[in-house]
Image: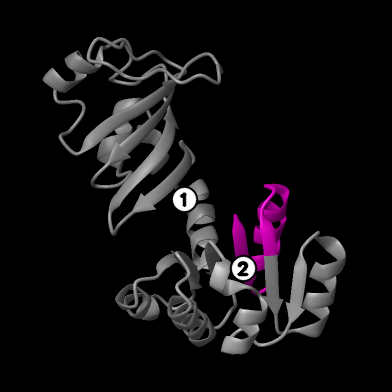
């Protein structure tokens, strides 16, 4: 892929690392001279030290033939302008970081894929790690729903039951779905079926429409996590 990354800061730098390591053709636009010079030394890609809110700069970066533009600057106004210009130049995929949640609707109105302020996401992740240590990993979907990983404990009400039995007993609500099961540390996940029996130590990937609430996580034996 031909990817244009705007910004070589805290968000853009690891993105450049991933994109170049993945064998993509990457062009970076960075307004700050020191950041631009550092990225140029560190990565095998073209780095343009210029203002990405200029159409001429984007054209110099070859945006007209790019598969994607990703704007990662710390200013929403800059990201919006970059996205609008990228749209004008018919870039197929346009993605941007959004720092202020109040601006999210603006990005949606112009049809740009967005990622919420990563600092806020990191803070939420760290808080969740302390508040609900039973949850190994999680991803929020929309306002309330979540996908999370959780380990089944010995005292779990669902332990030893098939998914069909758990459903009949009301242990698994209508808004909860067990998506995958990792057992005995093996990398290949088990695809859950009605007759799949849940065992202690299973690492479950769970979708919950109401989020990882205590009512949801209790069935996996983690009631003490919210005491």
Residue 71 lies in the magenta-colored region: no
Examine the rendered structure and indicate whether residue 70 appears above or below residue 51: above
Q: In the image, residue 93 lies at what x, y percent? A: 46, 63
Identify the mark at residue 99; answer none if there is no mark.
Answer: none
Label 2 and label 1: CA atoms lie apart by 34 Å
Which residue lies at the image location 66% right of the left edge and 53% below the top edge? 24
Q: In the image, residue 220 lies at what x, y percent? A: 35, 27
Q: In the image, residue 125 lies at what x, y percent? A: 50, 53
Q: Quadrant of the N terminus?
A: bottom right
Examine the rendered structure and indicate whether residue 147 appears above or below residue 181: below
Mark 2, residue position: 4
Residue 43 in the figure: left or right of residue 213: right
Which residue lies at the image location 44% right of the left edge and 78% below the top edge? 100
Q: In the image, residue 70 lies at what x, y percent? A: 55, 68
**Quadrant in the picture for residue 35:** bottom right
Examine the rendered structure and indicate whether residue 136 appears above or below residue 125: above
- The boundaries of the magenta stretch are 1-26
Mark 1, residue position: 128
The mark that comes first in sequence, 2 or 1, is 2
Q: Nearer the viewer, mark 2 or mark 1?
A: 2
């Amino acid at each position: 892929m031909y990817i244009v990354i705007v910004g070589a800061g805290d968000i853009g730098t690891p993105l450049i690392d991933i994109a170049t390591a993945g064998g993509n053709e990457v062009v970076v636009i960075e307004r700050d001279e020191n950041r631009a010079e550092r990225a140029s030394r560190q990565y095998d890609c073209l780095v343009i030290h210029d203002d990405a809110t200029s159409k001429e700069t984007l054209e110099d970066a070859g945006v007209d033939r790019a598969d994607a533009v990703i704007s990662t600057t710390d200013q929403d106004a800059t990201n919006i302008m970059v996205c609008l210009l990228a749209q004008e130049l018919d870039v197929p995929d346009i993605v941007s970081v959004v720092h202020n949640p109040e601006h999210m609707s603006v990005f949606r109105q112009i049809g740009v894929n967005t990622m919420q302020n990563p600092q806020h996401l990191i803070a939420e992740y760290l808080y969740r790690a302390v508040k609900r240590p039973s949850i190994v990993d999680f991803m929020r979907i929309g306002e309330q729903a979540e996908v999370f990983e959780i380990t089944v404990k010995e005292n779990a009400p669902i332990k030893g039951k098939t998914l069909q039995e758990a459903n009949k007993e009301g242990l698994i609500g209508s808004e909860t779905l067990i998506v995958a099961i990792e057992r005995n540390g093996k990398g290949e996940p088990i695809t859950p079926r009605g007759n799949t029996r849940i065992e202690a130590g299973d690492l479950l990937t769970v979708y919950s429409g109401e989020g990882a609430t205590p009512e949801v996580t209790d069935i996996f034996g983690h009631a003490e996590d919210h005491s």
